[in-house]
Amino acid sequence: MSNQTVLEYLNRLAADNQIKIFWLNQLHEFTTPACDTQTRKIVMNPNWHNANQIPFQLAHEIAHVLISDNSDRILYFSSAANHSKIEMEANKKAVELLIPEYLEYADPANINANDFVDQFSVPHFLSNFAQEVLSNCSRSQE
């Protein structure tokens, strides 16, 4: 599965949820994406140094909006612990958003959390959560 296929899926998901995505070509390769949860707008960096990670980043920003965590408003004033909790929730939601698309195109014989994490350059600390979601998907299909 190509990144483009996944990005098309995420763009449809965003549009279905009235989320507007702006791709800014002038950004530096290390400028991270951002979102405004109240206006439901996301700024993405198509020049990100790890192109494989762009779908996860977009899913993560969509997750912030879907969760409606107001992270763009509260993170500035928030404790490190609260910031970590908000980011972890968005990370987990991003995994949940990406796994159905991963399962759509993955070779059934090779479906596993490590492949998923590697394909989207998902942070490895989410491997166990990805395995849990994949296992739940397998059980629900039986």
Image (cartoon, grey):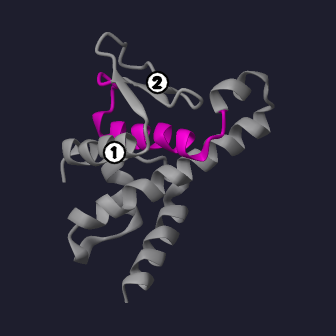
**Residue 115 x, y percent position in the rendering:** 33, 61
**Residue 37 x, y percent position in the rendering:** 57, 32
Identify the magenta region: 46-70
Which one is nearer the viewer's eye here, 52 or 14? Answer: 14
Which one is nearer the viewer's eye here, 24 or 88? Answer: 24
Q: Is residue 123 left or right of residue 106?
A: right
Magenta stretch encompasses residue 68: yes
**Residue 140 x, y percent position in the rendering:** 43, 82
The amino acid type, in three-letter code, at marker 2 is Thr
The residue identified by callout 1 is: 10
The quadrant in which residue 75 appears is: top right
Kindly identify the residue that appears in the image at 35 percent across and 63 percent down.
100
The amino acid type, in three-letter code, at marker 1 is Leu
Q: Is residue 117 left or right of residue 107?
A: right
Kindly identify the residue that appears in the image at 36 percent across and 23 percent down.
22
Kindly identify the residue that appears in the image at 47 percent across and 58 percent down.
96
**Residue 110 x, y percent position in the rendering:** 26, 72
The residue identified by callout 2 is: 32
- Main SS, magenta region, reads helix
The quarter of the rendered structure image containing the C terminus is bottom left
